[in-house]
Image (cartoon, helix red, strand yellow):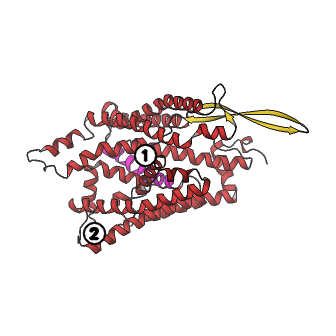
Amino acid sequence: MQSSGQSGTPRFIQAMADAFSLPDLRGRILFTLLMLVIFRFVAHVPLPGVDPEALRKLFQQNQLLGMLDLFSGGAMRNFSVAAMGVYPYITSSIIVQLLVPVIPRLQALSQEGEAGRHKVNMLTHWLTVPLAALQGWGQLTILRRTGVVLGSTDLLPTVAMVASLVAGTIFLIWVGERITERGIGNGVSIIIFGGIVSSLPQIVGQGLLVREQLGSLVLFILLALLMVVGIVIFTQAARHIPVQYARSLFKGTRMYRQTGSTYIPLRVNTAGMIPLIFAMSIVIFPGTIASYFARAPGEDPNFANRIMDLFSSGNVLYWLIYFILVIAFTFFYTIVIFQQQNLAETLQKQGGFVPGIRPGKPTTEYLNRVISRITWGGALFLGLIAISPYLVQRGVSNVQALQLSSTGMLIVVGVVLDTMKQLEAQLLMRRYEGFIK
């Protein structure tokens, strides 16, 4: 089978044509698209008794709802049955990951291979249900106080609405797992990706209609593209640690030693977007709580009003705290994930070693030093990405209608890269050229 790169067709178009020419790969792509269409339909099935105009005004005032809307794929803005999206599942996954090195039983399960990982995954699913119920009840309570959700506050209607929200979340998780199993890419990430991309035309349209400053708009778009390039570079960047494996071969009565070399890629941004989620949740929490105790405009401000002003997105202190928290959580999450991998012990069991480093504890200390140093690059990069909306909108561009969501851009770029790599692997197995040289 000849390589598709020999034709005059552009590489990307030829790779897509090759992908659709393979029946099984074409089926995976179409199945993924079908699941995304189903998700978008569910995202527009609203719960009864919601005031759309009051919900729109609330979103303009509350940043926490904007973050939750990101993980619901836009369903929160409509307050549909899928309003919570996969956020409870993400929260559950993070909690379980943090508990694995702390609880011996979970740590033992994670080391039992595929069966152990399946049990940990089931625990994550079971934990998602109470978290989703708690979050659903909290959202209903808050929206009722603000006049967004109308209707009875009796137990039965409340239970029915909470059950609908939990069912929507579980359904989206099921859709995501089907995409992972029968489609292309990570299903949960694809769900979030689909919601973010579906809102892009509306955001760009608002930027074009609200402002007539073409120069500022073009500059804004160029800066957004530069941010995407930076995200791609730091997402792909890795430090390659050389590793050698020694093995013994017997030929007749003689034994020969053979060595093979490879490397361990330590990523500069091991934590991904998780530090941004942690930091954003903490930095907007005081202002969100204070908003329910603050006095209305025109009245004498109280302590809650001062807290709201202090933790508003227009305050420099807000972005400074956000920047510091992102760096701190990047180191924390990277250390937790890296310790769970236990690379030094795995290398020793497989007969591998880092040249010039003794196996065991010296290898562990060496890898810890390397990951700590390169994480500084990833942490500072994530910190700059986190505060980039403030720097761009206040310092460079006057186009306020366009909102650069740093977390959203990280998700979009990460999902696109991961999906392209999976398609690349599928094409290369069949001796086709993929998307990447």
Q: Give the label on residue 358, or none.
A: none
User: In this rendering, would 216 be left or right of 191?
Assistant: left
Residue 83 lies in quadrant: bottom left
Going by the image, does 402 lie left or right of 58? right
Secondary element under disc 2, as helix, strand or loop, is loop
Q: Of helix, strand and loop, which one carries label 1?
A: helix
- Amino acid tagged 1: Gly
The Cα–Cα distance between marks 1 and 2, rounded to whole angstroms, is 30 Å
Residue, disc 1: 408
Q: Residue at x 65, y 46 (%)?
A: 424
Which residue in the structure is indicated by mark 2?
Answer: 49
Q: Which residues are magenta?
A: 188-211
Left or right of 373: which side holds 14?
right
Residue 293, position as x, y percentages in the image: 16, 51
x, y percentage for residue 397? 34, 34
Please identify the dominant SS of the magenta region: helix
| Residue sitting at the far top | 356
Residue at 43 percent across and 60 percent down: it is 127
Amino acid under disc 2: Gly
The residue at 34%/31% (across/down) is 396
Q: Is residue 133 above or below residue 291?
A: below
- Residue 135, given in percent of the width and then of the height, sits at 34, 59
Going from N to C along the chain, the mark reached first, 1 or 2, is 2
> Is residue 73 visible in the rendered structure shown here?
no
Near mark 1 (Cα within 10 A), the count class, few <14, some 14-19 or many ≥20, is some
Quarter of the figure with the C terminus: top right
Q: Position of residue 273 (x, y in %)?
A: 45, 43
